[in-house]
Amino acid sequence: MIELEAAGYTYRGGEPLLREMSLHLPPGSFHFLTGPSGAGKSTLLKLCYFELFPTEGDIRILGRSVRGMSRDDIAQTRRRIGVVHQDCQFLDHLPLSENVALPLKVAGKEPEPANLRELLGWVGLERRAEALPPELSGGERQRAALARAVVMAPDLILADEPTGNVDWDMSLRLLQLLVELNRMGKTVLVATHDLNLIRAAKKQVPARVLRIAGARLQLAGADL
Ligand SMILES: Nc1ncnc2c1ncn2[C@@H]1O[C@H](COP(=O)(O)OP(=O)(O)OP(=O)(O)O)[C@@H](O)[C@H]1O
């Protein structure tokens, strides 16, 4: 699903941030990505959804090398990836239901109202469909961001600190949704600082933990 082949990334004018990262995330797997603040977790996720391109090595996503892909290829592949952004990135003037349906509209598809209602029900937001993003709580925003990430039925879900601004009960609720998606066969990669979240997940799914340290990617030990 995601293969890194000695991939690296350096922001323009900076020191190398990510170096010689090799990794294979098989379809249907659940991985966490952890590491200190500023280690490059968000950057690595951005490489996995074509927001950025590796400055060294190669990345293959859904079987396609990011090198030499046309804009159309990127757009097609991107539709099979659901992203939960760290800051949710909603359009504040549109109600929640329209924000969640936005990826469909962008792809030229008309959202099916019953499907949209079912999706909002799945994240427990059926009664908030008409609310504007600034009216939502942190936990509601995170659940809405997850609903929007899966509205296109992606094969791969990338979540950047999806429990960043919520309490522990809400973190567990969000984790439950990610676990359900994984049990449906989706490949899941979650960047998080929260080691308790990782421990809670490991009781439910055979999640593996990747850690960025000193610009390199390591597989964390079973103790985590
Ligand atoms: N567009 C950019 N241009 C230059 N440097 C950047 C850019 N985006 C991020 N960086 C730098 O790259 C480093 C890694 O940032 P990144 O957001 O990937 O880390 P992170 O591990 O996700 O951090 P956090 O846990 O705090 O979210 C940081 O030093 C950051 O300042």
Image: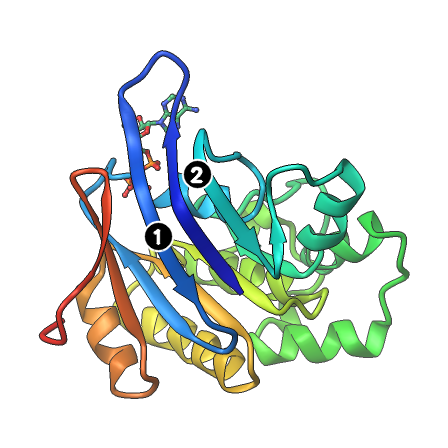
Instruction: Return the disc, 1 or 2, that comes first in the chain's sequence.
Output: 1
**Residue furthest top as drawn:** 13
Task: For ligand 1, give the image quadrant.
Answer: top left
Position in image of residue 213 (x %, y %): 17, 45
The amino acid type found where label 2 is placed reads Gly
Identified at 31% across, 57% down, the residue is 33
Residue assigned mark 1: 22
> Does residue 49 appear left or right of residue 94 in this picture?
left
Q: CB of mark 1 within 8 Å of CB of mark 2?
A: yes
**Of the pair 76 and 95, the residue shown nearer to us:** 76
Residue assigned mark 2: 57
Position in image of residue 145 (x %, y %): 55, 57
Q: Is residue 175 above or below residue 219?
A: below
**How would you rate the neighbour count of disc 2 (Cα within 10 Å): few for under 14, some for 14-19, many for 20 or more?**
some
- Image quadrant in which the C terminus is located: bottom left
**Residue furthest left as drawn:** 223
Examine the image and state in which quarter residue 112 appears: bottom right
Examine the image and state in which quarter residue 83 appears: bottom right
The amino acid type found where label 1 is placed reads Ser
Mark 1 Cβ and ligand 1 under 8 Å apart: no
Examine the image and state in which quarter residue 146 appears: bottom right
Q: How is the image coloured?
A: rainbow
